[in-house]
Every structure is written in structure tokens, then in C-alpha cells.
Image (spheres, rainbow, N blue to C red):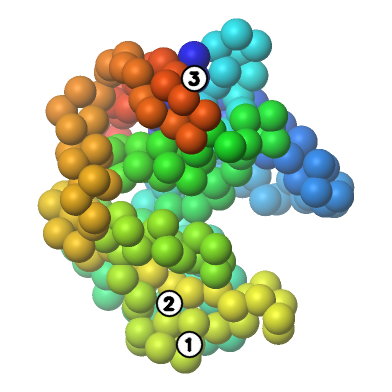
Amino acid sequence: MFSFKAFRAIDEPELCIKFIEGHANVLKDYGVTKVTSSNNDWMHNPYVFVITVTEKSSDKVVSGLRIHVSHQDFPLPLEGAISQVDTRIHELISEYRKEGTGEIGGLWNSRAISGYGIGAIFLSRASLVIAAQLNVKTLFALCAEYTLKPTMQKGFEIEENIGNKGTFFYPKLDLVATLAVLKDVEMLPKALEVERDFILELRKNLKIERMEETPKGKISFEYDLEIENPNWQE
């Protein structure tokens, strides 16, 4: 069984540390060992929300992602990344911020559970389940080439006012990144029907245990996707 837990980062410091340790272990598996602590400043940011996936039998966090809500005092991570190639990103985010916006990112998956679709399918869907609780109309994602298609299937579209019609070389000259934006977090009008139905159904049942069909067969998932502090912006 896998357990999905959503929370505001500053409310669950111990879970944040498990998230960081799990992510660091994944990076080590891929040969990345130099990860600075400054990359983890998000755990002290009151505008960051997290979903962790815990394998119940081992009690290990095996996957996770974050949503950063845009605030003038806390720039989105993508602003720092994209401003290196296009400074218009700050003005663009500022405009979207007027009605509430944020960024989904930081998704990682333990190799031990690869093939189940935990991150690519279920965790990315869960992020849009909790996004409706965060008072954001829109949501951004900075996509690598292999994540663009599944992101678009959830209702995102390319933001063509940045880079070369939404694309640019990042983090190095032989890698193409694309800025995508979901313009209606609540209704998901451009999402594939199967994606939208899953997300909207789970929004009605934020705390539920159910069997999910994964690429490796049916598995029991336990969801706890209700943000416990609904008045977090006050």
C-alpha cells in the first residue's frame, strides 16, 4: 500500500526532512552527490505545499512533489531558472499573480518503485487535487521534453510569451525546456477526460482508500489530500 499525504511545508518539518532525504538518495542513484542545503530553503517557505508518498510496509517516503504559491516576497523557482535566458518571466508571473498562481515541480521517484506510475501518473494528478485548495487560478510547470506530453494531458498549454514560443535551452544548451501553464485549475477544461474525471472525483473524497490500476496491477492507495490549515493565507 502507498499513502499520499498533502501538507503545508512549514507545518510538517519532519516529513519535509524525509522528502529531502528521499530525494537526495534518488540523486545519488544517478551520480549527483553535490546538493547544497540552500536548495532546501523551501521547507521554511509558508507558501510551499508538499505531497509525499510513503510505502506503508517500510514507512519510507518513496516519492514527492511540491507546489509553490507565488508571492512577491517568495519568487517561484522557475523565475530564477528562466530569468537566466529571458528576464520577461518576472513580469509574466507578476501579471498571473494578480489572480493567484503557482508552480508545480520538484517531483521525484525512488527507483525501488519505478514502473508503478506513482509519480508520473498518480502523484501528478494528486497535485491538481490539492491545487484547488490553494486559491490559485493558474499553475505553471517547467517541463523537460519527456514530461511535456503528460503535463499537457492534464490541461496545461504552452506559455508562448517566454523564450522561443515557450521553449528554451535549460539547464544546458543541449536540453530543451518548455514553460507550460494551466489556466483554469478549478475546471481543467483542456485536460483529457480520463485525467479530469480522476482529479475531480478525488477532490470530492480527499481522504479515501481505494484500489488503483497501475502498470504493475491493482494496488491499494491511501489518500490524505486535505490541507489542514484552510486559512493559511490569513
- Residues at marks 2 and 3, CA–CA distance in whole angstroms: 38 Å
- Residues at marks 2 and 1, CA–CA distance in whole angstroms: 13 Å
Q: Which residue is mark 1?
A: 163
Nearest-to-viewer mark from 3 and 1: 3
Q: Which residue is mark 2?
A: 90
Identify the residue at horizontal 36%, vertical 25% (top origin).
212
Identify the residue at horizontal 27%, vertical 47% (top origin).
195
- Please name the amino acid that badge 3 sits on: Phe
147 is higher (above) or lower (below) than 109: below
Q: Secondary structure at mark 3?
A: strand
Q: In terms of depth relative to the viewer, which is nearer, 141 or 30?
A: 30
Outermost top residue: 57
Q: Secondary structure at mark 1?
A: loop
225 is higher (above) or lower (below) than 142: above
- Please name the amino acid that badge 2 sits on: His
Q: Which residue is mark 3?
A: 2
